[in-house]
């Protein structure tokens, strides 16, 4: 199953982890990513710590746990490639209705990532040493 089909089909809980240029780590709850036709992954984000970290360190990991019993899901290793601020594509991709008050106050970014590696939520995956 492609990542695009996976995230269109599965519901669950996601965490995007980043670190700044000095290695200080952050983790934030994020919804499912938008997977574009070329395999690029994109997240809509506010101008907060996660976005700030990506300015000095382009690497991130998205952990996704599927709804339901057990621990099914994915860990996706990402590298930031570019971003757009308040773009038409960003507003097209939004899944939730915007809050007019919050939208007026905070700048939003559509941040694009290249997928480096995708492994199961539990276990080392095929090309990884045992954890």
Image (cartoon, helix red, strand yellow):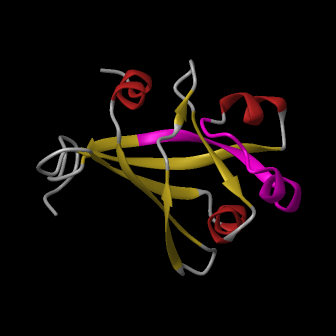
Going 16% across and 51% down the picture, which residue do you hit? 71
Q: Position of residue 68 (x, y in %)?
A: 18, 44
Give the magenta range. Answer: 95-116
Which image quarter is the C terminus in? bottom left
Indicate left or right for 56 with 18 as reference.
Answer: right
Going 82% across and 57% down the picture, which residue do you hit? 101
Going 68% across and 40% down the picture, which residue do you hit? 97
Which image quarter is the N terminus in? top left
Indicate left or right for 27 with 50 as reference.
Answer: left
Q: Position of residue 11 (x, y in %)?
A: 35, 38
The residue at the far right in this view is 104
In the displayed structure, would residue 47 be above or below residue 89? below
Asked whether 35 falls inside the magenta stretch, the response is: no
Report the number of discs. Answer: 0
Quadrant of the rendered structure where residue 102 is? bottom right
In the displayed structure, would residue 63 be above or below residue 127? below
Indicate left or right for 56 with 128 as reference.
Answer: right
**Viewer-proximal residue, 73 or 76?**
73
In the displayed structure, would residue 94 be above or below residue 6? below
**Viewer-proximal residue, 58 or 11?**
11
Going 55% across and 33% down the picture, which residue do you hit? 34
Q: Position of residue 17 (x, y in %)?
A: 47, 64
**Viewer-proximal residue, 69 or 81?**
69
In the displayed structure, would residue 88 be above or below residue 111? above
Q: Position of residue 15 (x, y in %)?
A: 43, 58
Indicate left or right for 83 with 61 as reference.
Answer: right
């Amino acid at each position: 199953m492609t990542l695009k089909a996976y995230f269109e089909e599965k519901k669950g809980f996601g965490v995007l982890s980043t670190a700044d240029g000095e290695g200080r780590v952050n983790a934030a709850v994020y919804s499912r990513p938008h997977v574009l036709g070329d395999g690029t992954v994109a997240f809509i984000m506010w101008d907060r710590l996660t976005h700030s970290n990506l300015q000095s360190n382009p690497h991130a990991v998205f952990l996704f746990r599927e709804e339901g019993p057990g621990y099914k899901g994915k860990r996706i290793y990402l590298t930031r490639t570019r971003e757009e601020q308040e773009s038409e594509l960003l507003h097209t991709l939004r899944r939730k209705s915007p809050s007019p008050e919050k939208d007026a106050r905070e700048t939003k970014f559509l941040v694009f990532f290249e997928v480096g590696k995708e492994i199961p939520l539990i276990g080392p995956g095929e090309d990884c040493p045992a954890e």
